[in-house]
Amino acid sequence: MRSSTDRRGWADAARDTAHLVAFRARTVRRPAGTVIGAVVALALTAGFALGPALVNLSALDSPALDRALATLQGNLGGAFVGILLLAVSSSMGSGGGRELLSRSEAAIHPISPVTEHLGALLLAPLNLAWLVQTWGLLAVTALVTALERLPGAQLVVLAWVLAATAAGQALGWTAEGVRRTTHGVVVVRVVAGAVVLVVAGLHLAGALGPLVRALPTTWVAQTGQTSQWPVAVAVLLVIFLAAVALGARPAAWALGLPPREELRVQSGVHEARPAPEPRWGSPDRALLHRLDRGSVWRSVGMRRGLVVLGLGPGLVALVAGLEWSSVMLLPGLTASGAALLFGVNAWCLDGKGMVWRETLPVSARDVFDVRALVVAECTAAVSGATVVLALLRNGLPPLVVGASVLSCWAVVLVQVLAIVMTWSIRSPYSVDLSSPRATPAPHAAMAGYAGKLSLVTTLTGMFFTGLASLPWVWVPPLLALPFVAWSGWRLVRARRRWLAPAERARVVLTVAAV
């Protein structure tokens, strides 16, 4: 029997991956929108890679600006490390990476582990955090690199992103394989907790910055800004190819083991609990709240994703030494990432049980309000953890900056909630979220959602970053009111649409057809 990882196996896997991509492309509801989204993403990538270099900052003659650029230059190697940490955490959180074909659909097809591995690599860029980190690294590199050295430096950045993604994918498959062993879940959690404690300890001891600057990523970043950049590109491409090849081994190992966490959730027996005492509202709302919270927490993928999103960006801020002006962009991006776990298709939490849910003697208003509350809780918890970790790194900000951060945080939470609840009613999808590799919508739709959310929250963060430079503390809260009012109106409009029986029936029948 021919091994699935020999030369013929790789050729077959590449062909199968192309077939799956073509199949997925033909199931897109709005092909024109997908093409436009791809063009916009490429245009943004080019803009971030070239735009900052075209700005003549030296003409401003500002000592503060010079210090900021020197800080960015010194932390560029740390930003490279952040890309690697993101790739590892994203792959571990999604159980080895996203799947081109859902587990239920793939059950009758002979899809090899190598095909799964290649598909997960192809889908890695359809990740909000991946896109934002890559764009940020391109922009920072363009700021600190001389114009004549910029093409080589950006090629090094792209080669590093490829190598880090492939290496993160291989480590993610390894972690998933360990999870599927007898005591693997405990092992992975202990190791991850130990890493977090070590990073926190190094930061408190003041050794984290020097350690990060001593890593080989500093050499990669510095070499990209010299005439020796082809050497760095060649080395990184070799690492990329080696990581892709080596990643097939842990992928085959992991996919050959039973998914213990998912099976435990599906086969577990839970004792009935007494009805919750309502702290506010009616008993019906309290029961719905417990049910919806439990649906989120029981999903292995969402549980992992919320933890990774809550800790990952904050740890990147610790490692890279981001200032408050950069940290202000993170709450919106992490809230968007949390919404992308299920909020963009919020009713998919119920699956086939959506029909049963509609037979319960509860008000449709309560159903919408509680589901929106659960989505808001998840986005607030994840983005709040990022703010807390930023406080550990930078300490308390000045009063105006603190007011801007809190105002921006409140605005992006309401923005994200209104947007995703509107999408959930306008474009519901039938998906099965029992697998940690599943997504709440097709991958093309997820890419569009990620782009729209990141654009809205990034522009909002940039707006409040500008307000932080003003001397008046009352300005950020005052200017936050129109944003909140507009998003609140959108949320009310989505609620009104849900209350229409015909619209609600369409959503229920679509989501229940799993």
Image (cartoon, rainbow, N blue to C red):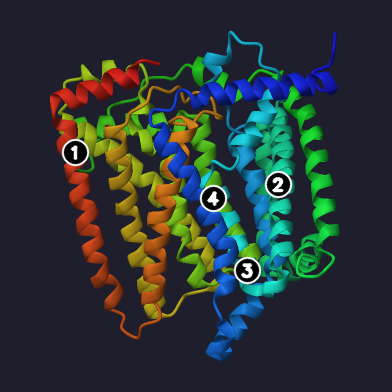
- Which is nearer the N-term, disc 2 or disc 4? 4
- Which is nearer the N-term, disc 3 or disc 1? 3
Q: Amino acid at mark 3?
A: Ala
Left or right of 120: which side holds 226?
right
Q: Quadrant of residue 212?
A: bottom right
Q: Which residue is mark 4?
A: 42
The front one of 2 and 321 is 2
Secondary structure beneath dot 4 equals helix
- Which is nearer the N-term, disc 1 or disc 4? 4
Q: Quadrant of the N terminus?
A: top right
Q: Which residue is mark 3?
A: 142
Q: Amino acid at mark 1?
A: Arg
Label 1, label 4: how many angstroms apart (C-alpha)? 35 Å
Q: Quadrant of residue 510?
A: top left
Label 2 or label 4, whichever lies nearer to me, is 4
- Which is nearer the N-term, disc 4 or disc 3? 4
Disc marking residue 162: 2
